[in-house]
Amino acid sequence: MNDVKILIVEDEPIIAEDIGALIEKNAFVVSAIVYTKEKAMHELQTNLPDLVLLDINLNGAMDGLLIAEKINEQFNIPFIFITSYSDKPTLEKAKYTEPSGYIVKPFNEAGLYSTLEIALYNHAQKNKLKFPPLSLQRINKNLPDLISEREFTLLELIYEGKTNKQIAEVLFISLNTVKKHINNTYLKLGATSRASAIVCLRQLMTDK
Amino acid sequence: MNDVKILIVEDEPIIAEDIGALIEKNAFVVSAIVYTKEKAMHELQTNLPDLVLLDINLNGAMDGLLIAEKINEQFNIPFIFITSYSDKPTLEKAKYTEPSGYIVKPFNEAGLYSTLEIALYNHAQKNKLKFPPLSLQRINKNLPDLISEREFTLLELIYEGKTNKQIAEVLFISLNTVKKHINNTYLKLGATSRASAIVCLRQLMTDK
DNA sequence: ATGAAAATTACCCCAAAGGGTAATACAGTT
DNA sequence: AACTGTATTACCCTTTGGGGTAATTTTCAT
């Protein structure tokens, strides 16, 4: 089961088959082709694919958008819209669902394939985006009193949950030195404790 | 200066103009059109755009990929490849740069516009993805001994850097109770201190 | 080579946090 | 009614962490 399974939600059988053939030609597996929102939800619950290709307009309703919302809420998989509706209001609604791609018919084969590949890869990288490693540059960008490199290495260890004693050991310095450095960084960060220092670091890493 | 500025890196003047016209028709601003890697880097440093449209192949070399890497390293803006090279090796290399989109020529206008809109929107959402709020469901999913709801509220406060005293005050409970709860959660998390508890929470939030 | 900034160490003190045991109250379950 | 799990509180004790001052060494730039 190392194959990449793709669910196609498309109410036009000809196009669905077309897309399906194209996908299988590119070493992916079509897990199912469904025509309605209900069937799509059932398929998601019973046979979770790795990615969903979604037509926005299913039998007259914009059920594709609803499916997209459900995917965001309940499943952690990427999806790509494939639709002939490229008017602004539809696109507006679509983009709020944060799709991995939005392909407008008629599309070319290479375009679909590359969008698929990138969606899968970017999604796989997504978890790494959470809780990114600390960056001295980013932190100092938002501080009046700059953190030195040495202090930063101490901060990284604090951020990893190390105790002062552990820090002293891994850095081959005395416990007093550790305390001193940490004290200095607390002043610069405006922190009053380890936990609050970590909170400060989080904020400094996100603030522009 | 509320306009969305887009930099076009494309060595075929006709196509560049074409894309430029299309962009301006859609209420975006073309910040510049450049033909070489060097000019692109200069433009990024002096007049940072909100998004970059990148041709991979510039005058025979695959400089587009190098520019993409530089953008990832130094600038926090989205970029979209627009290229006629859709062979697998090129796509492989391209996807590792984590582009917001990959458009294969010939492309249709609606496709470019929708990809642009989505890239901009998704990128704006990206920062919110960093350091997501804690979720009891996610945490318990990876624990043998489950955290109770009450304990979770305590954990959230610890995660926000609050001291035991502060927690006792906001929850109207005694300091002893706070200590007791926290002690229990440490056992469940396998943590030995506040900082290490935060580390545990981070890991539990990312692990599948 | 002189001075400034950063790193290192020591010492003291007090506040905060962690670990253990025990008891009571209160909910929902069987 | 008895049982279970959670929440609540108290008490005791030990360790860790935070705050202040002071002194020495290293490093780097002027």
Image: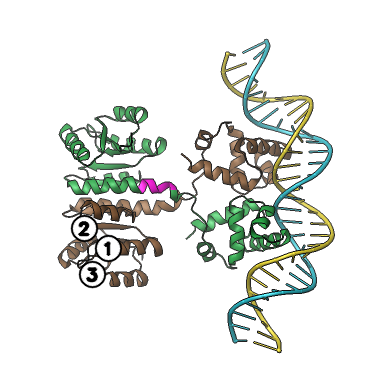
Chain colours: A brown, B green, C cyan, D yellow
Q: Quadrant of the N terminus of chain A?
A: bottom left
- Which badge, 2 or 3, is on the more N-terminal residue? 3
Side (left or right) of A201 relative to A105: right
| Residue B123 in view (yes/no) | yes
- Identify which amino acid the numbered label 1 is placed on: Gly
Q: At 73% from the left edge and 60% from the top edge, which residue is drawn?
A: B176
Q: At 17% from the left edge and 67% from the top edge, which residue is drawn?
A: A13
Q: Secondary structure at mark 1?
A: helix
- Which badge, 2 or 1, is on the more N-terminal residue? 1
Instruction: Write down the residue under mark 1.
Output: A64
- Identify which amino acid the numbered label 2 is placed on: Thr
Instruction: Write down the residue under mark 2.
Output: A83
The disc at residue A35 is 3
Q: Quick one: label 1, few (<14), some, or many (20+) residues within 10 Å?
A: many
Q: Nearer the viewer, residue A83 or A8?
A: A83
Q: Are marks 2 and 1 on the same chain?
A: yes
Q: At 25% from the left edge and 49% from the top edge, which residue is drawn?
A: B114
Judging from the image, mark 3 belongs to the subunit labelled: A
Q: Secondary structure at mark 2?
A: strand
| Residues at marks 2 and 1 touching, judged by CB atoms closer than 8 Å | yes
The disc at residue A124 is none
- Which badge, 3 or 1, is on the more N-terminal residue? 3
* Region of the chain picked out in magenta, as a range: B122-127
- Identify which amino acid the numbered label 3 is placed on: Tyr
